Image (spheres, rainbow, N blue to C red):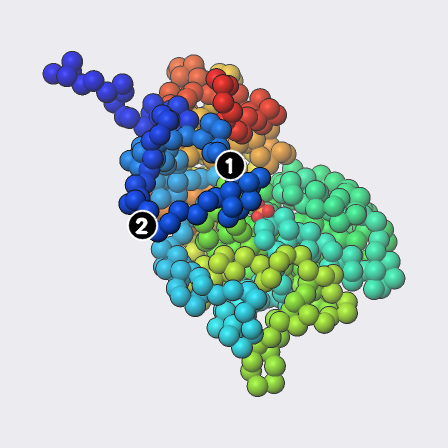
Amino acid sequence: MSDKITKASRHVSQNEGLIFEKSSPGKRAFDLPPLDVPAADPAEALGANHRSEGVAGFPEVSEIEALRHFTRLSTWNYAIDLGMYPLGSCTMKYNPRVNEFVARLDGIATEHPLQPEVLSQGCLKIMRLLEKCLLAITGMDALTLQPAAGAQGELTGLLLIRAYLESQGDARKKVLIPDSAHGTNPATAVIAGYQVENIKSDSHGQIDAEKLRELVTEDVAALMITNPSTLGIFEQRISDIAAILHAKGALLYMDGANMNALAGVARPGDFGVDVMHLNLHKTFSTPHGGGGPGAGPVTMKKILEPFRPVPVLVEKAGGELTLEQDRPHSIGRVKAFSGNFGVLVRALAYILAYGPGIRQATEDAVLNANYIRKHLEGVFALPYSLPSMHEVVFSDAIQKQNGVNTMDIAKRLIDYGFHPYTTAFPLIVPGALMIEPTESESKEECDLFIEAMRAIAAEAASDPDIVKHAPHTTRIGRLDEVTAARKPILRWSQGRK
Ligand SMILES: *Cc1c(COP(=O)(O)O)cnc(C)c1O
């Protein structure tokens, strides 16, 4: 029977070549009826020098070949819709289909940001309502929805701090950043024109408040803190930290990308934060990955409000909404129009679907992370023992004894049907395994993940080579990631093999 099978492999998609390799001259993916009007002379219509004889090397394939090619490629992708995607820090959660439905409604998807404001009142109301929700969740006084990502929110936040301090007569020189912060934080501070001073975490992964007291001088503009930190741990002395900064006229910036550990439970505005960004594409569930689109709104206390990016959404006396451009102290525009509106719509849909129950999402995210922690503790080393919030960070110290590192374990996880967790981050944990299940996952899926991780740990002890050379079930095995990043080949060119 098996000799009747003439396919090159069991799964056609595993052998898919480049579309250029399928090309044969004259093939077309469409068929038009003969022209029944006089043909225009293209040279006359366009001008001879605008006329092309075709694109050299452009693939020529039939409709079904084009369709199958891209459909097969699409089956190589791992996606949140296929299974758990436990990338720590990235908050890869389920994106409810109702968000997509709402974002595609006529009157939302079809609106243009340049249409007159009288015709845009519905969209402006959506933005207004989202603003109110985000202020309620963060406990802040004002915000901007403009930034397109978390990192751009950080930059906006630091520019607000700079503008405020300059208005006080001194922009100051330094921004303090703990070693448990996200990597974008120091990059942001430098782009905003500040020197970065690193603060070492104590043995519990917390900021040493006494050390901080020494470091906060009249030169310090702000502390940028990721809370919960990239260790997944809440800064227990956050109010004291805020007080230390405020006593010296410095401000507290919070990287709020981990707000899925706090929403509905604790409000940064209440524990002393002056300005923070949110990652709507993480916490409030809009599809992300592959570079966007995203939204990184910045919420702030009153003192920073005059400096907000323009335009600012305001309500006129009769209740009509308008985008105000004339704000003399504004840091200016940070993004075209009003940000990534489609992302804002999806985030609002998500928040409204939960309503006050957003607390439930937070509690489930924390519960799932701790469930995984409890079942993997001892199997994997736990470098910091304070309670985990929405994610848990292990290290590969136990598996290292058999020469197996976090990257090997992550690659082996692919063979078990899971997307890898985040490897080697945060930097303060050597050989980190950073795992974030999010609230989306059922107990059954968490159990499967735990089982896979325990099985890999057993393999690392009994047959380390199988882990070290993973993945074994993918079309291509272990990639040379360094060369791929340093010398990327992003374009096919004719004749290159
Ligand atoms: C993802 C993330 C960022 C950066 O957000 P982008 O939207 O990717 O720019 C910053 N800080 C933390 C803690 C994050 O997890």
What amino acid is found at the position of numbered circle 1 in the picture? Ser
Judging by the rendered image, the residue that carries numbered circle 1 is 52
Q: Nearer the viewer, residue 251 or 109?
A: 109
Residue at horizontal 66%, vertical 72%? 324
Horizontal arrangement in the rendering, residue 170 relative to residue 427 (left or right): right
Is residue 97 shown left or right of residue 209? left
Crowd band around label 2 with a 10 angstrom C-alpha radius: few (<14), some (14–19), many (20+):
few
Q: Quadrant of residue 48?
A: top right
From this view, report whether residue 466 is shown above or below residue 74: above
428 and 328: which one is in front? 328
Measured from the top left, where is residue 72 in percent x and y? Answer: 33, 33
Residue 83: mark = none
Q: Earlier in the sequence, mark 1 or mark 2?
A: 2
Residue occupying image coordinates x 62% and y 58% = 336
Confirm whether residue 228 shows in the render: no
Figure disc tally = 2
Query: Circle 1 sits in a helix, a strand or a loop, which is it?
Result: loop
Q: In this view, does 183 lie above or below 27?
A: below
User: Which mark is on residue 36?
Assistant: 2
Confirm or deny contact between disc 1 and disc 2 (CB under 8 A): no
Judging depth in this view, the residue of 241 and 7 nearest the camera is 7
Classify residue 288 as left or right of residue 202: left
Q: Going by the picture, which residue comes out furthest to the bottom?
A: 318
* 270 vs 244: above or below: below
Label 1 neighbour load within 10 Å: few <14, some 14-19, many 20+: few
Report how far apart the C-alphas of labels 1 and 2 lie in the structure. 24 Å
Residue 44 is situated, as x and y percent measured from the top left of the image, at: 51, 46
Amino acid type at circle 2 is Asp
* Secondary structure type for disc 2: loop
Disc 2 Cβ-to-ligand 1 distance below 8 Å: no
Quadrant (top left/top right/bottom left/bottom right) for the N terminus:
top left
